[in-house]
Image: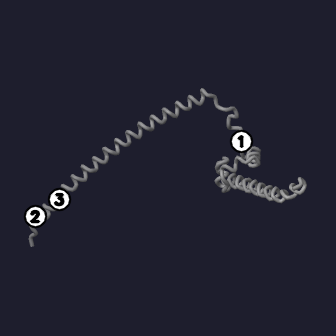
Amino acid sequence: MHRHKQKNANYGITLAQEKQRQATLRLLEQTIQEMQQKHLPITKTSVADEAGVSRQSLYAPYIKDFLDGHPAFQTNLAKADKSPPTIAYLQIENEKQKQKLLSLQEELRKTKKLLQMSKQSYAELNREYQKLLGRYQTDVGQKFIHF
């Protein structure tokens, strides 16, 4: 096939793909505007969820360029530190998370112990209730009714 004919054969496909891309960008723009009107937090993930597109599609170059240039994401980018975190910072964060995990595990252990004690207490109270109920039934059964 000649190059000229091949280029013309793919023209319809590329045109359809471009229309689909533009429709996706319009959908994303509309979704962002609706989220702004509703005062919802705007993140790429929330936009993808609201628009009904997959999160993986956000990594397509045309969508990535669109979102990076969108004013709604400029404020988010300004807040974020553009330099990658250092190893020391990540190690400190890792240690913080380890300490948090240890404290949560300790709290879980205490809660499990409290639950076990509560179950035992409940069982004892239930046995005591059964005894009292049995005694009450025997006492009521032995009463004489005078006419």
Q: Is residue 121 above or below residue 26?
A: above
Q: CA distance from mark 3 to mark 1?
A: 72 Å
The earlier-in-sequence mark between 3 and 1 is 1
Residue 57 point in image, percent of width and height:
69, 50
Residue 111 location, quadrant: top left
Q: Residues at badges 1 and 2 in contact (C-beta under 8 Å)? A: no
| Mark 2 or 3: the one toward you | 3
Judging from the image, what secondary structure is the residue with disc 3 in? helix
Direction from residue 41 to residue 115 in the image, left or right: left
Left or right position of 109 against 55: left
| Residue 22 visible in image | yes
Q: What residue would you read off at disc 2?
A: 142
Q: CA distance from mark 1 to mark 2?
A: 82 Å
**Mark 1 or mark 2, which has the lower sequence index?**
1
Q: Secondary structure at mark 2?
A: loop
Residue at 67%, 51% in the rendered image: 47
Q: Secondary structure at mark 1?
A: helix
Residue at mark 2 to residue at mark 3: CA–CA distance: 13 Å
Q: Is residue 41 above or below residue 5?
A: above
Residue 77 in the image: x percent, y percent? Answer: 71, 40
Q: Which residue is mark 1?
A: 75
**Between marks 1 and 2 in the image, the one whose residue lies nearer the viewer:** 1
* Residue 8 image label: none
Badge 2: few (under 14), some or many (20 or more) residues near its Cα, within 10 Å? few
Tell me the residue at 45%/38% (across/down). 104
What amino acid is at disc 3?
Gly
Location of residue 30 by image quarter: bottom right
- Which residue is denoted by mark 3 in the rendering? 134
